[in-house]
Image (spheres, rainbow, N blue to C red):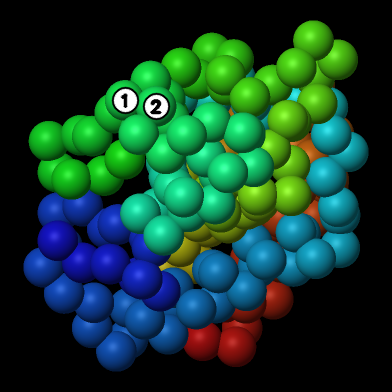
Amino acid sequence: MAVYRGKYILQGLKEITPEMEKDLDLAYDICMSYKDGFPCEMCGRCCYQSNIAVRPEEVDRIAHSAGIPLHDFITKYIVRTSDGRMLFRRTYPCAFLDKENRCRIWKDRPEVCRDFPYAVSMFMSRVYIALTNESADIMELIDYMDDSWPCTKVIRSNISEKILEARSTR
C-alpha cells in the first residue's frame, strides 16, 4: 500500500512514481488553497462523517484534551481496523461534538478534522483524477459533496478553473 505525505493511504498501489507524486502535489496544493483561503465556519456538519481517523501520535493529546484517562479513551472511543488504522468509534455525530455543534476537543482535534473537507483523501483523489484525465469532469467527480455546506459552495465556485490552471503547468 502506498502512502502519500505520510498520511494519505492510496489503496491498490504499491508505490508512488515520481510522475504520480508530481500530480499528487498539484492536487494537494489545490486542496490546501481552499483550506488556507476559507477558514472553518464551525457549522458542525463534518462531524457527522464516518471513519474519522486518528493517528497514533494524536491519541494521547486528544485523550488529554477530552479529560479522559488514556486507557479509557482508547477502549471507549477508538476502534482499530483490520489494516491497523485507528478510528473514532462513534462518528454520527462525533462523540466530541457538543449540543451547540461545537467541537469539545477543537484545539487538539485529529488532523483529518483540521483538513476536512479540503485535504482529505476522497476530495484529493477526485482532484488528482481531474488533473490527470482531461475527460474527467471535476463537478461530476465531487457530486458527493453536500451543496448546503459553506465549504462546498466555495469549492464549487472555482474548482474547475483551478483544475484547468494546474493542467497547464503539468
The answer to whether residue 104 of the structure is visible from this angle is: yes
For the point 69% across and 76% down, the residue is 165
| Residue occupied by mark 2 | 72
Q: Which part of the image, by quadrant, shows the N terminus? A: bottom left
Task: Name the spot of residue 145 as percent of width and height, x first.
Answer: 62, 30
Label 1–label 2 contact, CB within 8 A? yes
Instruction: Please give left or right for residue 110 compared with residue 78 in the image.
Output: right
Instruction: Please give left or right for residue 57 compared with residue 83 in the image.
Output: right
Task: Name the spot of residue 88 as percent of width and height, x first.
Answer: 43, 29
Q: Is residue 29 above or below residue 69?
A: below
Q: Determine the image quadrant of residue 23.
A: bottom left
Instruction: Please give left or right for residue 75 compared with residue 155 in the image.
Output: left
Q: Determine the image quadrant of residue 109.
A: top right
Judged from the image, the secondary structure of the residue bearing numbered disc 1 is: helix
| Of residues 92 and 23, the one drawn nearer to the viewer in this rendering | 92
Query: Disc 2 marks which amino acid?
Result: Asp
For the point 26% across and 44% down, the residue is 85
| Residue occupied by mark 1 | 75
